[in-house]
Amino acid sequence: MSFNTLGLSEAILKAISKKGYNEPSPIQLKAIPPILHGKDVLASAQTGTGKTAGFTLPLLHILSESEQTKFRPIRALVLTPTRELAAQVYANVKEYSEFTNLRSAVIFGGVNQKPQVATLRQGIDVLVATPGRLIDLQNQGLLSLKNVEILVLDEADRMLDMGFLRDIERIMNMMPAKRQNLMFSATFSKDIRKLANGILHHPVQVEATPENTTVDAINQKVYRVASGKKTDLIIKLISDGNWKQVLVFTRTKHGANKLCKKMISAGISAAAIHGNKSQGARTKALAGFKNGSVRVLVATDIAARGLDIPLLPHVVNFELPNISEDYVHRIGRTGRAGASGQAISLVSADETTYLRDIEKLVGMKIPKDILEGFEPDPNASTEPKKQGRGRSSRSNSKSHSQSSKKSNSSNKSSSSRRPKRTNRR
Ligand code: AMP
């Protein structure tokens, strides 16, 4: 099946061919036609499936087909949970709209608002934004959403996890009721369905490859190890295996910094990416990782969410996530674009419960191994370690200053199905 049959304009097909895509991915095949027909769409798709083009291509088509007024109001809004995802979606929007006369912009917190405001003043058709900065600028009267025709909620599940429910509701009230709504989410909890019911009208539901298929394609392995030996073990695995590009997940920001320092002391180039890092530091770390000057990127779940790093050969869970679904998201980063990958988890006794939950979710036993010299501690307790300070520290994290008031609401809304997040990211 080729892109030509989907009804997209010449200008957009030209951009697709410039990107070198030969055929639409399954989610694109399923989502593009109903979006072009003006339907609301509820899509289940993880990052790596081509979901961004799945909503961006038809959105650009619709906007470029309708007449433009001299005063250019924002006609499409893409909301994303993180700055990185916003920047990535924007980069995609720029590329795919290159041969149209549509203008776009991205706004997110953590950086000076002035250049963003200057771009908005020139008039833009497509705005990609994180909720906090969007609301800030709207409150200051610096942007209007009164002419939005198409709304995209990208990674809606993560938005709820991050406590953006109240913000989303506020943003909904800034837009006309009559508009096309597209919602993309990797997982479908009760809360996501509730949100979808409140926003979408008779949505067409589309689904990319089921998560388990992705998981099956990835070579997974667990090393049982004493928690105090994890750092030495990971350094050994990276050095002995001569791994060139490794994404390592830690549960906390502090843990990410600490591990990163140890890697650097061991002569392995590493950078950490998490919520307390400035936008500049995060962008630099990611760029270094992509161009090969940074061998190991140590990340927390939220920071890593949605990062577009194709063909990632190795993902290591330095600590298992306490939310099983995060495991699937983490390791899903290795099998992207059909490339095979290896996902290794270093598991200490106190993570036994997390491992059991993860195996239940992915529906398989993950092969386990013990390396000589890195044996687990037979006397260690299997009780999960108490983490965090009783409430999500995201609520006082600088990076999510937008979410300061919202963490509580999200915890409440998701507490019925999911364990409470106590991790400090
Ligand atoms: P996404 O799931 O939107 O993050 O996209 C994952 C990666 O797939 C990105 O690097 C895209 O550039 C790439 N991609 C998107 N659509 C296609 C396609 N039809 N063919 C090949 N690669 C694609």
Image (cartoon, helix red, strand yellow):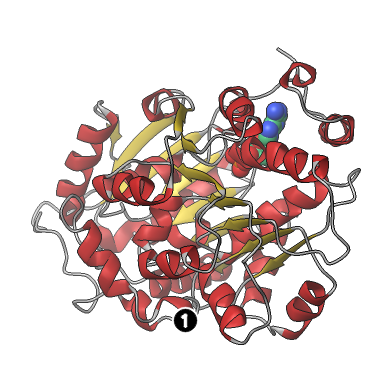
The image shows residue 24 at horizontal and vertical percentages of 68, 23
State which quarter of the image contains the C terminus: bottom left
The image shows residue 356 at horizontal and vertical percentages of 17, 40
Quadrant of res 406: bottom left
User: Which residue is found at the position 59% from the left and 38% from the top?
Assistant: 51
Q: Give whichever of 304, 34 is nearer the camera.
A: 34
State which quarter of the image contains the N terminus: top right
Q: Is residue 76 visible?
A: yes
User: Which residue is found at the position 38% from the left and 55% from the top?
Assistant: 318
Quadrant of res 33: top right
Q: Is residue 374 visible?
A: no
User: Is the residue 252 above or below the residue 202 in the image?
Assistant: below
173 sits left or right of 31 in the view: left
User: Which residue is found at the position 41% from the left and 55% from the top?
Assistant: 158
Quadrant of the rendered image holding ligand 1: top right
User: Which residue has dot 1 on it?
Assistant: 401
User: Is the residue 114 above or below the residue 164 in the image?
Assistant: below
User: Which residue is found at the position 38% from the left and 40% from the top?
Assistant: 328
The image shows residue 384 at horizontal and vertical percentages of 14, 59
- How many marks do you count on the picture? 1
Q: Secondary structure at mark 1?
A: helix
30 sits left or right of 168 in the view: right
